Amino acid sequence: MTQRICVWSGPRNVSTALMYSFAQRSDTTAVDEPLYAAYLATAERREEHPVWREVMASQPTDPTEAVRQGMLHDPDTDVLFIKNMAQHWQTFDVNLLDKFTNILLFRHPVLVARSFNKIVEAPTPEDLGYPQQLEILDALRARDLPVITLDSTAVRNDPESTLTTLCQKLDLPFDPAMLQWPPGPKPEDGTWAPHWYGNVHKSTGFVSGASTIPNPETLSDHLQDTVERCLPLWEKLTESRIV
């Protein structure tokens, strides 16, 4: 029986690197954001997303079909690793949560807001996924389903130890192959990859992040406001992180 691992990540959270990491396992098939087109179909700001028309043409825009094709199919491997953005959560049927082992991947709001703003300007907390991640956390707890919460900074700064702990939580053996991948585009990349994955395409493994969080006052007034609204949500997520 296929083990289905679903990561609900905010944007700019090292989620693509984590997907590449799991894709190096011989027992795992990786899927890149299968709900993106369904999200864009109703998103008010979809025209601000690079190549949004191409994304919508590359995937089902019907949420039920997107889940069926991208999340419930049977791969040729024992594990299906699904990278989802938390802001795409609104298209997901909450009643399907028990079909997956769910991971919440997050990062400090200052780092997320500053990075995301380079591609989509003036993001809101909803654009950064924090409110949706708490909705997912609450939904899992209400159903008495397990959840793994993971700070992406730990993955970047101590990948071997963090991935070993994560694999233990997933009841999978740690595979050293998860620490490296070839540079450049990958077979699992979505249509949007050239516009979002520039840095990770240059990488061959996890790159350590900043040891200190930049002062929010270095951000624009709008980003400062967004960060202030996200901080209490991020703090709630960090309360139960595994590392």
Image (cartoon, grey):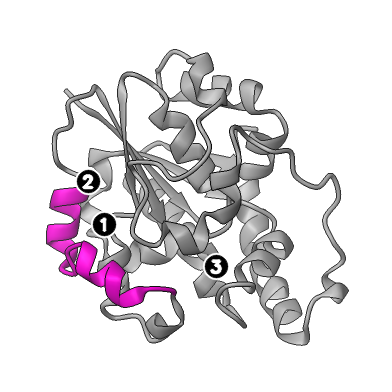
The reply, left or right, for residue 158 in relation to residue 122 is right
Quadrant where the C terminus is found in the figure: top right
Establish if 55 lies above or below 160. below
Mark 1 and mark 2 lie on one chain; the one further toward the N terminus is 2
Tell me where residue 127 appears, x and y as whole percent: 51, 73
Residue for point 28% across, 81% down:
42
Tell me where residue 36 appears, x and y as whole percent: 32, 64
Q: Amino acid at mark 1?
A: Val
Establish if 191 lies above or below 27. below
Q: Main secondary structure of the magenta part?
A: helix
Let me know if residue 240 appears in the view.
no
Which portion, as a residue range, is magenta? Answer: 50-70
Location of mark 2 (residue)? 71
Location of mark 3 (residue)? 128
Location of mark 1 (residue)? 94
Establish if 103 lies above or below 164. below
